[in-house]
Structure formats: structure tokens, C-alpha cells
Image: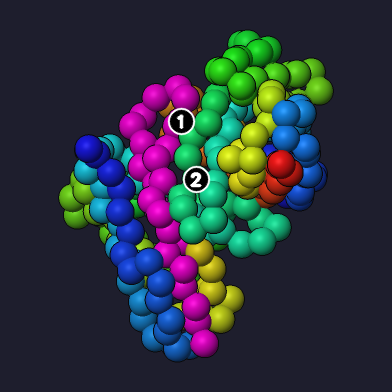
């Protein structure tokens, strides 16, 4: 069965460290997205990609970067982790189409101390 | 400025009764609306959607109503079951290809046995 996975599921890091969160999907979807979920804010878009070598900034992209070298993976990098980046991060993927339905991974809980 | 708002952070309902979750939006260019359900420690999962050319869509116990003039949609769950207890997110798309979703802040539904 096709799926979308994220690793690690939990991560604790120190302020100033570089951190990379992995996202891998086997749906063969062109579109991939990274969100963060914080209380009171719902899901906020960090970065997204509509295909290999394509990346775009979302609503809350400062301090984050992504790269898309193949269809399956969209790793999210925190260049220099800050306490404000403590959050739950979700990766999602979709195919282009009118409904916009996205399939989500299980999430990564990141704590920056 | 939030384009999609869920003004009730939580809702408590008795088992067997109707649950009504509400969502308001401001962008008249949105043309597709989706509801996602999220259990703790899991990613959101798609529940039901509605096109802007319709005013109602039904799937089993779940019905979504859209009032375009009021820029308001609602999700009805009848009858509510304890397993429906989760966070529900309203989302909207409007970038023609339906690739981008804008999420509301979520409503936590608790169904009491």
C-alpha cells in the first residue's frame, strides 16, 4: 500500500543546531508540503513543492529550507534551531486536481531546548 | 489575517446526538472545501469535501453544508459516536489546480458516552 512516512517521530535538539526532518512518500505524488501545527494556529504551511527541483515558500518559511531531488522525498531543514520552532511537523502529498485532497504523514514532534 | 476560521476551539456532545462544527472563510476565490479529522499522535486524515458549486454533500453520518453568500460551511455528524472524538480541521483551496490548502485553527470534538 502507498504511504507517507516521517522520521524521526520525536526529536530533541539544542538551540542553534541544524536539524533535518525526513519525509518519504510512495504515492508518486508530484505535490509535497510541510506544515507545522501549534495550538490556536491550526496547520500552517512552511514550504511546498510541485515537482522535482521545484520549491516554494509558504506562510511561515523563515528559518526553514527544503530541497526536492526526487519525487519521493522532501526533507525539511532547520538551519539554526530556535525555541520558537518547537512544534509538531507534518508532511503531506497530493496530486494536482480540483479537490486539493492531501495525504498526511504521522508527524514529527520537535523540541528545541 | 486568517482566511479560514474555526471560532469554536472545542465542542462537547452526548453520544447519539448531532455534532455541528462550523467554519468561516473570507476569500471568495476559494472553490473547494475539505474537512480533515485528526487523532492524537497521528496525521490528519481526509473526511469529506464539497465543491463551491454545491451546497450540500453527504457521506454516511457526515454531511457538509456550504453557504457561499455567508462564506460559511458546517460539518454535521449524526449520530455522534465516541470514536468521533478528535480535532477537526476545515480547509479551503482556490488556486485553480487545487494544490494549496488553507487550514482553520481546528475544533476539538468530545463525544461523551
Q: Residue at coordinates 30% horizontally, 54% vertically from top-left?
A: A5
**Residue A48 screen position, x and y as percent:** 40, 49
Of residues A53 and B81, the one drawn nearer to the viewer in this rendering: B81
Of residues B70 and B88, the one drawn nearer to the viewer in this rendering: B88
Q: Quadrant of the N terminus of chain A?
A: top left
Instruction: Specify the subunit that label 1 lies on.
Output: A
**Residue A3 screen position, x and y as percent:** 28, 44
The residue under label 1 is A100
- Residue B71 placement: quadrant: top right
Assign a secondary structure to mark 2: loop
- Residue B44 marker: 2
- Residue B30 placement: quadrant: top right
Q: Residue at coordinates 50% horizontally, 78% vertically from top-left?
A: A111
Q: Residue at coordinates 40% horizontally, 76% vertically from top-left?
A: A11
Q: Residue at coordinates 61% horizontally, 62% vertically from top-left?
A: A38
Q: Note whether residue B41 is visible.
A: yes
In the image, is residue A96 part of the stretch drawn in magenta? Answer: yes
Magenta region, residue range:
A89-113
Q: Residues within 10 Å of mark 2 (few under 14, many from 20)?
A: many
Give the answer, above or below, for where A9 lies relative to B113.
below
- Residue A41 placement: quadrant: bottom right
* Left or right: where B64 falls relative to A55: right
Amino acid at each position: 500500500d502507498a504511504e507517507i512516512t516521517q522520521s524521526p517521530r520525536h526529536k530533541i535538539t539544542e538551540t542553534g543546531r541544524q536539524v533535518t526532518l525526513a519525509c518519504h512518500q510512495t504515492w508518486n505524488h508530484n505535490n509535497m508540503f510541510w506544515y507545522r501545527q501549534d495550538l490556536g494556529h491550526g496547520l500552517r504551511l512552511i514550504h511546498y513543492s510541485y515537482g522535482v527541483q521545484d520549491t516554494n515558500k509558504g506562510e511561515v518559511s523563515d528559518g526553514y529550507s527544503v530541497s526536492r531531488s526526487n519525487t519521493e522525498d522532501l526533507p525539511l531543514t532547520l538551519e539554526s534551531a530556535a525555541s520558537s520552532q518547537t512544534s509538531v511537523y507534518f508532511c503531506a502529498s497530493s496530486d494536482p486536481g480540483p479537490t486539493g485532497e492531501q495525504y498526511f504523514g504521522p508527524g514529527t514532534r520537535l523540541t528545541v531546548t | 489575517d486568517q482566511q479560514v476560521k474555526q471560532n469554536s476551539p472545542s465542542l462537547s456532545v452526548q453520544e447519539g446526538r448531532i455534532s455541528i462544527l462550523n467554519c468561516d472563510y473570507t476569500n471568495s476565490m476559494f472553490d473547494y472545501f475539505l474537512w480533515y479529522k485528526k487523532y492524537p499522535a497521528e496525521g490528519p486524515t481526509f473526511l469529506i469535501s464539497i465543491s463551491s458549486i454545491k451546497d450540500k454533500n453527504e457521506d454516511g453520518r457526515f454531511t457538509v453544508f456550504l453557504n457561499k453568500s455567508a462564506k460559511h460551511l458546517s460539518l454535521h455528524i449524526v449520530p455522534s459516536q465516541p470514536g468521533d472524538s478528535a480535532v477537526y480541521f476545515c480547509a479551503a483551496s482556490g488556486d485553480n489546480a487545487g494544490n494549496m490548502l488553507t487550514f482553520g485553527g481546528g475544533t476539538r470534538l468530545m463525544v461523551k458516552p
